[in-house]
Image: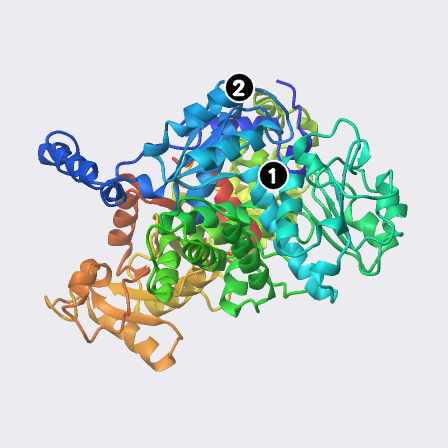
Amino acid sequence: MADETSPNEKQAGFTAREALFYHETIRPGKIEIIASKPMATQRDLSLAYSPGVAAPVEAIAANPADAAKYTARSNLVAVISNGTAILGLGNLGALASKPVMEGKAVLFKRFADVDSIDIELDTEDPDKFIEAVALMEPSFGGINLEDIAAPECFIIEQALRERMNIPVMHDDQHGTAIIAAAGLINAAHLTGRDLKDCRMVVNGAGASALACTALIKALGIRHENVIVCDRKGPIYPGRENVDQWKSAHAVPTEARSLEEALEGADIFLGLSAAGALKPEWVEKMADNPIIFAMANPVPEIMPDEAKAVRPDAIIATGRSDYPNQVNNVLGFPFIFRGALDVRATAINEEMKIAAANAIAELARERVPEEVAAAYGINHQFGQDYIIPAPFDPRLMEVVSSAVAKAAMDSGVAQDRIEDFDAYRTSLKARLNPTTSVLTRVYEDAKANPKRVVFAEAEEEVMLRAAIQFRDFGYGEPVLVGRTEKVKAKLRELAVDDPESYIIENSKTSDKVPQMAEYLYKRLQRRGFTERDVGRMVNQERNVFSALLVALGHGDAMISGMTRTFAQTAREVNLVLDPKPDALSFGIHMMIGKHHTTFMADTTINERPSAEDLAFIAKETAAVARRMGHEPRVAFLSYSTFGNPSGKWLENIRDAVAILDAEDPGFEYEGEMAPDAALNPKVMELYPFSRLSAPANVLIMPGLQSANLSAKLLRELGGDATIGPMLIGMEKPVQIAPMTALAPDVLTLAVLAAAGVVG
């Protein structure tokens, strides 16, 4: 198929081909239903269905509020659309909107642990849509309306808010409004303005623009100080062909064009079209102008164009590649989280204002060192940081708490939170920080693209990962393989420009003589002849690939598709060494819903000494910290504090003693069995243990138990697994499992490129 890349995809750095592959692989779509209770036995099934369901049915019939206790309703939001305004693509119908609605459901889960299901309604009749959604009230704790065209979206939302006794929000309107309002609060603060005295010009009169205007007025900007413009210019009383929603914002003005309206204005707020704001018009705005150019994917004016004429401007856009991104994901997950947690009957103006203020205040707070280090949020409040980063983990507790409190104070909460400190703690526990950190790692890789050598480019999985690596903007893949075979496979995978890829073929490369000389000097005293070295350079792709990295033709390397980890590691070690005074080893990272566990060494060292174990513990703890976790290290054994006794315990005890002498700055304990390290009830049996909570770094006593455990967990456990991740090499090298899928290989390649592990 032709690679028809949309503007949205160009901004994001991937192609239609890779987007389709992402949605198709593993299992079609992005969501699945997983039971939250045991379903293994007949008794389980009897409790889950008949006759066990009779008891909660009767309880709910007697007291409808008990649905929050006995069903998932209180944490379940429906994402509903009719597909009449899909992203920037227009009216493509209900079915075509399903990928977007699934995506929104995933964001609810990812950012706020809100369960969500997408529903697509095949009607453009507002009355039918309203009736269908209203009838579903018993099923859901909240309704998120999405991608519905104006003016029907106004009619639908208003009617549903009046009819339904659960929160209803059209995120295209209010989500954008809340984030934009937060940014404006901070921009006004930075420029010494009082919102009530500001003059604002809004360009665009669709659902988002009018919702932004209404909320910003609720925050204090006076109605008469706001001029709203549509395609025909400013909206003023008496103008023809103005609907009721636009006319609500009509004000007397002599201006008859956007250019005239902007003279002396403090704020430009755009939700219109690319290029709608001209640089010469920006020049006529007030001192320190505030420009929110939020058209997507191309804003009304690019930030560098605005800065060229007004260096004093504060600028926000909807784009992730410029500062101050107005991103709805800062708002809607946490707004619904707070609303659901107090069983709010609506999302009202007070809750929206509370969310905007909370987001604004968070941006003004100093970013804690641990958050800055783990999440890469290095900005402090200022012109280029008036809106928090979307993956700031503090959003969950700050925004959700503010919304819940506003719901209680405004009288729409059916439940009350008595201890907000405890509530904020529970919110933090809902999320696994690893997911946010991985988001940051991918962003870092895009900001600092590297050349990664893909050692087995003739293998489809490896090649797909390489294509994604380039298409997503993480760097330049260097493909190792037979030139024509790699090009043929690129064409098979619908790559339009296979000639543009760097392909290194050991049979034809002019780098081979230099490689052979380098490797012979390295190996001649290890029993290798020149002929041996020449053969390896020409025939062993892992050797050839490692030499590309060693000689500076690549920054990192990924392999593993055709050889076992051990064999691949041996071949790489012919070329590359561990870091000086270091030990190479492997980590498996197990990512669960609310936890991440790091297990080491799972790949290299068969019987590590006490010094090795101590080193592995310190390095794995450092990786855990870089991934957003405060390490709690357990040295595992079959014995817990000497019971039962045995002959393989001394090196573990000595490793603990080494850390005792060094005071490494993290919790550690051992020797201990896995249940004593992970099960809180078992941990209570050992009150002297130095672990304050279950361990998240497990140091294994030897390679046999470590490798068996990692592979068993990967095959039988419910956690996602990243790894093994190779640590301690002088150059970044990662070795994927032979059974890895393209996304697994891509993750390891990005981790290597970003320098998070290695």
Whether 60 is drawn above or below 606: the answer is above
Q: Is residue 71 left or right of residue 408?
A: left
Q: Is residue 512 left or right of residue 633?
A: right
Residue 297, given in percent of the width and then of the height, sits at 69, 37
Q: Residue furthest front?
A: 238
Residue 293, given in percent of the width and then of the height, sits at 73, 45
Q: Is residue 430 left or right of residue 477?
A: left
Residue 439, given in percent of the width and then of the height, sits at 52, 49
Residue 659 tag number: none
Type of amino acid at the residue the image marks with label 2: Asp
Mark-to-mark CA distance, 2 and 1: 39 Å
Residue pictured at 49% horizontal, 22% vertical? 127
Residue ID for mark 2: 125
Residue pictured at 38% horizontal, 51% vertical? 413
Q: Nearer the viewer, residue 309 or 501?
A: 309
Q: How is the image coloured?
A: rainbow
Residue ID for mark 1: 472
Quarter assignment of residue 672: bottom left
Type of amino acid at the residue the image marks with label 1: Phe
Circles 2 and 1: CB atoms closer than 8 Å: no
Per the image, label 2 sits on a secondary structure element best described as loop
